Image: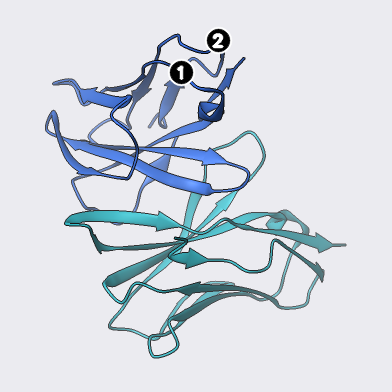
Chain colours: A blue, B cyan
Amino acid sequence: KAGVTQTPRYLIKTRGQQVTLSCSPISGHRSVSWYQQTPGQGLQFLFEYFSETQRNKGNFPGRFSGRQFSNSRSEMNVSTLELGDSALYLCASSLAQGHNEQFFGPGTRLTVL
Amino acid sequence: DQQVKQNSPSLSVQEGRISILNCDYTNSMFDYFLWYKKYPAEGPTFLISISSIKDKNEDGRFTVFLNKSAKHLSLHIVPSQPGDSAVYFCAAKGLSGGYQKVTFGTGTKLQVIP
């Protein structure tokens, strides 16, 4: 069974631009969560989607948004990029909302110049 | 406000000895705890978990201990192997601000020396 895939793996953008990251969960998994990892803050929870609806969210500004499609694939969008948005963005899938065991993708490394 | 803390950023252990990784939390609403292992250039992989109604869970070489009164959990790896060298994250799950969230610690880098 294929794991969680994320595209692109690396991305370079400039301040003010927007970016869209994609995540394909493990087949059969219906919940997708997004995390931001930075050296000083560790992994921080962004949001969780289940059945195309945002079910949980972390403490990030509205510039961070996401969506989930009917096939459970998810996208995350960051608008008006700031230098501090440079991070590794990880997607994790699980069978259902709130399911304890999550499976992570390799992440997308975003660099904002 | 770091609700889950891993105060040791790194740890070195000889192969064959015990590795003990520690984690402290502040939110009493957390009801489930997990440990993840992360290799460079890969996403974290689930290792072991424990419910707040238990104080110990064991899976092969890995054992997690939970002390609710102290709001402390630890991961024991016995015996440690070079392949265990990775960054270990503890995570806590529970209601926070009206949402069910998973909160991660900042990680402890474990090096097992052959």
- Which of the marked residues, 2 or 1, is nearer the chain's N terminus? 2
Q: Position of residue B15 (x, y in %)?
A: 81, 69
SS at circle 1? loop
- Please tell me the numbered disc located at residue A60: none
What subunit carries mark 2?
A: A
Q: Position of residue A67 (x, y in %)?
A: 22, 23
- At x 29%, y 57%, the residue is A100
- At x 77%, y 58%, the residue is B82
SS at circle 2? loop
Nearer to me, B93 or B86: B93
Q: Give the quarter of the figure containing the C terminus of chain B.
A: bottom right
- The relative height of residue A10 versus residue B47 in the rendered view (above or below) is above
Nearer to me, B111 or B78: B111
Q: Position of residue B35 (x, y in %)?
A: 48, 62
Q: Give the quarter of the figure containing the N terminus of chain B.
A: bottom left
**Residue that badge 1 annotates:** A81
**Residue that badge 2 annotates:** A14
Q: Amino acid at mark 2?
A: Thr
- At x 50%, y 28%, the residue is A85
- The relative height of residue B88 versus residue B8 in the rendered view (above or below) is above
- The relative height of residue A43 versus residue A23 in the rendered view (above or below) is below
Mark 2 nearby-residue class (10 Å; few <14, some 14–19, many ≥20): some
